Amino acid sequence: MSARIIDGTAIAAAIREELRPAVEAFSRRAGRPPGLGIVLVGHEPASEIYVRGKLRAGTEAGLWVDLQRLPATASLAEVLALVDRLNASPRHDGILVQDPLPAAMGPGAAQQVFDAIDPRKDVDGFNPASVGRLVQNRPTLAPCTPSGVIEMLDRSEIAMAGARAVIIGRSDIVGKPMAMLLLHHHATVTICHSKTRDLAAVAAEADILVAALGRAAFVTPGFVRPGATVVDVGISRVTDRAEVERLYAPDSPRRATFEKRGSLVVGDVHPDVAAVAGAITPVPGGVGPMTIAMLLKNTLAAATSTAGR
Ligand code: NAP
């Protein structure tokens, strides 16, 4: 058996197309496009790539995307002042501060910054007010990655109601909101983490297994009940040739990609899982593009509910 591939790139493209008329209607009505402010502090290479993707997708969708850069030496007070300015700006409907902030800013800096974002503009859904509303299943801007996963499952007709869902990872940005969203879709949810005993056995009970731990190819076939849906959130960059050769057969196109680029983006799910799972999201081309599509959707939602303020 070979798993059905859930094509995140195609689903994300469909969502972007669906948003287009609403973006145009907003722009006509408001006399300006929906505005997204992105704050990028420093030059972390992965963040640069993510922000570039968000800029391109936002601009293509007809949004005004305003990238505000601060140097890696910026103080927490400077970031907070910038967030205040964007909170007050009538042109910025959504605000996103790219995580992580430079380590020199100190522990808890990101939390302070997320706390400062106006919840009505909180397109990442990390503000505690947004989190609280999510927990209570009230209308809110939900975090983009887990809400992208829900869209993928929904549009792929994977039944969530009554399903056993297991999430590996309990971060504030993926694992926990993922659990809440699956719960609100009536799944029976288990959250696993680094202290979970018998992790593979717990995971193997899942009808829907979400891997969000950030360890390349960690989830092997022994974690997966035959026929289960496996959602791979992880993104790791592998540069070790031996590891690539361990993961992929000599004729795999992934090996050719590694030869060309010298590195490979790999998910948390081992390639052999495709032989066991019923459906699976690939990396790349799975959850990643969905995250960006949901960011655009959240920005439009924020614009629509704040217009006229
Ligand atoms: P994170 O904050 O580092 O959290 C990782 C979670 O995984 C933690 O809860 C940790 O447990 C758990 N974990 C780590 N090693 C484990 C192990 N051996 N067994 C069981 N649990 C383990 O990471 P994150 O921000 O949630 O991101 C997770 C992954 O998703 C990363 O690869 C990230 O790059 C990727 N990601 C992708 C997208 C996308 O758009 N595709 C978006 C966001 C994140 P403890 O809590 O016990 O430490």
Image (cartoon, rainbow, N blue to C red):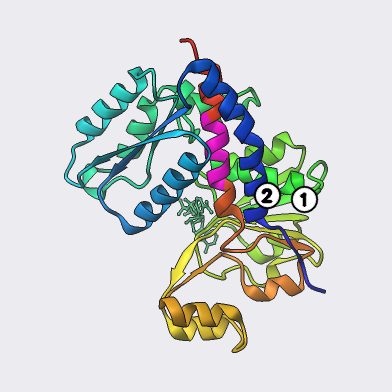
Give the image quarter of residue 183.
Answer: top right
Answer yes or no: is residue 138 visible: yes
| Vertical order, 199 against 56 (above or below) | below
Labels 1 and 2 touching (C-beta < 8 A) = yes
Image mark count: 2
Q: Looking at the image, which is closer to me, 48 or 214?
A: 48
Q: Looking at the image, which is closer to me, 188 or 266?
A: 266
Q: Looking at the image, which is closer to me, 188 or 296?
A: 296
Neighbourhood count class around disc 2 (C-alpha, 10 Å): few under 14, some 14–19, many 20 upward:
many
Instruction: Name the residue carrying label 2.
Output: 11
Q: Nearer the viewer, mark 1 or mark 2?
A: 2
Amino acid type shown at disc 2: Ile
Instruction: Name the residue carrying label 1.
Output: 156
The location of residue 306, given as percent across then percent down, is: 50, 16
Please tell me which residue is depicted at 57% across the width and 71% down the height of the picture: 217
Disc 2 element: helix
Please tell me which residue is depicted at 59% across the width and 23% down the height of the picture: 25
| Vertical order, 216 against 123 (above or below) | below
Give the residues in magenta: 291-299
The residue at the far bottom in this view is 250
Residue 3 in magenta stretch: no
Amino acid type shown at disc 1: Ser
Please tell me which residue is depicted at 38% across the width and 28% down the height of the picture: 115
Alpha-carbon span between mark 1 and mark 2: 9 Å
Disc 1 element: loop
The location of residue 113, given as percent across then percent down, is: 33, 32
The residue at the far top in this view is 309
The location of residue 269, given as percent across then percent down, is: 61, 67
For the stretch drawn in magenta, what is the main secondary structure? Answer: helix
